[in-house]
Structures are given as structure tokens and as C-alpha cells.
Amino acid sequence: MTTSLRVRIGVLGLTLLAGLAAPTTTAAAKAAPSPTTEEQRLDRAVPREILRRSGFDSLTGEFTRALGSAGSYAQARRVVVRDGSGLWQRAVSRAQGRGPAGGDLSRDDDRPLYWARLSMTREVRTWEPGFGLSEAQRAALIDELERTSRGQTTVRLPQDSAQGSAQGSPQGRKTTKRILVTGFDPFTLDRDIRISNPSGATALALDGTVIETADGPARIETVVFPVRWRDFTDGTVERTLRPCLKKVDLFTTVSQGRVGRFDVERTNGAWRGGFADNDGIGVTGTVPVSDPASQPQWTTTTLPYAKIVAADTGRFPVYDNTEVTEIPAGGTAPVVRPDGPTPGSTARKGGGGDYLSNEIAYRATLLRDRLGRHDVLPGGHVHTPVLEFGAGNTDPATGTVTDPGFVRNRLDIIAQVRSILKVAAAAG
């Protein structure tokens, strides 16, 4: 074989190898999925206005440029963790009056965090990097972004809890109690895309703060959860709360409930009612948990509900809600029970309904019980009033994204949750 022939064959071989390798990168690029239903709402005018009027629109551009410069999965992951954590801290600082407001939108607003997070997850979801990115790697990046931007990776609990150091504390010393509070993203956005969730706003306002109670100081740490069935099915609640519930002295899951009232939900049910989530997906059936063979139909609050209801915590009335919907033992049709479930019944609605509010309460209290802390850890669910816009601004088609009444309602709800926590922490 001549030298020139060997060269031609070698070049042909390299060309063939290159041709075989090329589809891998191309396939990875083509595999980039489309934005989710939730992310597609970003293209509407209201989300863009909220981001612009809070200064959070600049965060997306910075994130996009940083992600685009990543030359490997490891570099991309570092960008995601840094910017996801930075988004959470920026939102918390803004809500608590630190740093620039970034615009004229009130600082107590939870919506900039929500829409900025979606703009970042959409960027990762549709990103076509110059290196091969597998489906699993893309999913891992989105998961990191979700967790870090929700405060789920930065829960910082003090070491000297009231329970953990009572025996070793000097006589008379007031130890710092540890409280965990959870909130939710806005939801029902196709009904009114302007909507805010006071539980998410409360999480931002209270994260890392210390409240003085009749029983001494208490530090609050908060996290926020998505309004998506699949995340709950995948165990996001348990993954986030398990290490916390081993250490805290009190926990409260919080969500938006009924108009004009707070509810302390007495009982939670193991049933999903099928209402559509933020991705437009509805799921019906028993709440899926690990070890379903030992799964109860009902769990109960251990919050000091009687003391909470009796206290003057704010302008909204607070109720001890005992109503559930069940299928009685031996029955086939659902029955409303105003005083809680009967023995052997099957859950169809907890006090908090059959949506994700009920489910997070069910999962958190079940986790409490499976950790063996039912008798020592006060915890349960609090429903806030629905956050309403002010008079003359109720039509989603013609209304503005905010108004003085809307802000006042949100601030009052946040303040009342803080007061409820003070009562609960002192009673625990």
C-alpha cells in the first residue's frame, strides 16, 4: 500500500468517525424540550411588567449570559447553583428592606421571585449548549435551580434549640426556638395572571428573622414549594422537610385559603381531588407516599389551635376548621363531616380541601409522625385569607398589577401569620 493511499484511507476513516460522532451533539441539541405550560405564561404582558418594575428582569439576562459561557456540565451546574441561590437571597433581601428595591413595585411582593425563577428554568430547559448535555443532566440542572431559588438548600437553624439544649442550659437562660414555615407559588394564573400568593410573600418576609415570644426568642426559617402535582409525587416535600423536622421546635405549612379568614386545619386527608396545577395537570387518587402499606387516611395537627384561635392576632378572624369529607366505613358515597372523620373512613377532603394545600399538610404531618415526633413537635397547616385586589381593580382584563388595597391586604396577612407563630411558639 502506497503512502498516499494510506493517507486517503486515514482521512476517510476520520471523516466517517466524525460523521458518527456528529449526531450525538446534534441529537442533544434537538432534545432540548419546549417550555412548560407554566413557563409559556412569561410571554404575557403582566409577568414582564412585574419583572421590570422590580428590577428582576436584569437577573434573567445575567443568568442567560453566564449559562451561555459554560463549557461543560460542571460549569453550568456552578452557574445554576450560584444564580439560583442568589435569586432567593435577592428576593428575601428585597422583601425585608435590604438593598435597592429595583423599581416601584412594593417590597412585600412575592411575584418577582416566581416569574424570575420561571424565566431561568425556561432558559435551562431550552438551552442548546456547545457540548453534549444529556436529558438527565438537564433535569438535574433544573432541579438544582428549583431547590436553590426556593430556599430549600439554605435552611439555617440555630444550634441551641429549646428542646435540644434545655438540660445543658444555665438556669434562667432563654434558648432560641427553631421554627420552619413553608409557602407556595402563585396559582390559578389562567384565572388571573396578576395573582400573588400571601404564603409565598410571608416566606420571603420571615426567612431568617427572629421573633420575641412570651417563651423567649424564636428564629424562623422558610422555604417555598411549587404548585405542581408531579413535584409532590417525586418527594420534594419529604426531601426538603425531613432533615428540618428532626431539629425544629415548631413547623407550619401555609397556603392561601378562603376569603376573609384564617383557618387552622385540624385534619388532613390522603386524597388528591384533581384540580389543575400550574402546568394545567390534574391528578386524582390517593396521595402517593413511601411505604403505602402503613399510610393512614388521616393525619392531624399538633399546633395549639385553641390558643391560636383565642388570641388577638390581627384583623382577620381565625377559625379551628374541623370539617372533612369522607367515605364512611362500609359506604360508597362521600359525606361531609363537620366534626372530623369517623373511624375506618376513607379520605376525600381534609380540612384544607383536596388540593396541594391539603397535601403538603398531610405529607408534613405524616413525616412528623413517622419520625416519632407526634407528641413533641407542634405542627400543622394554616390557611391565609385569599389575597384580594382593591376596589375597582378586580377585573383581570382591565386591572393593574397592584394597588394600595392589594398591598395593605398582603402586609396585614404577613403580619398576622407572624403573630400566629408567636402564639404557637409560646404555647409549645
Image (tube, helix red, strand yellow):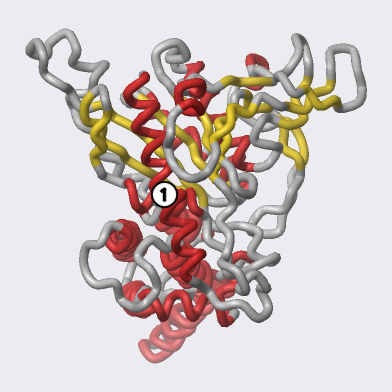
Residue 170 point in image, percent of width and height: 7, 13
State left or right for residue 299 relative to residue 182: right
Going by the numbered disc 1, the residue's amino acid type is: Ile
Question: Quick one: 286 or 311, which is closer to the camera?
Answer: 311
Residue 172 seen from this side = yes
> Residue sitting at 18 percent across and 27 percent down?
159
> Residue sitting at 50 percent across and 17 percent down?
370
Question: Quick one: 36 or 57, which is closer to the camera?
Answer: 57
The part of the image, by quadrant, that contains residue 99 is: bottom left
Question: Quick one: 136 or 428, which is closer to the camera?
Answer: 428
Residue 424 point in image, percent of width and height: 39, 26
Direction bottom: furthest residue: 4
Residue 124 seen from this side = no
Residue 88 point in image, percent of width and height: 34, 57
State left or right for residue 293 relative to residue 79: right
Mark 1, residue position: 414
Above/below status of 341 relative to 119: above
The part of the image, by quadrant, that contains residue 241 is: top left
> Residue sitting at 26 percent across and 16 percent down?
163
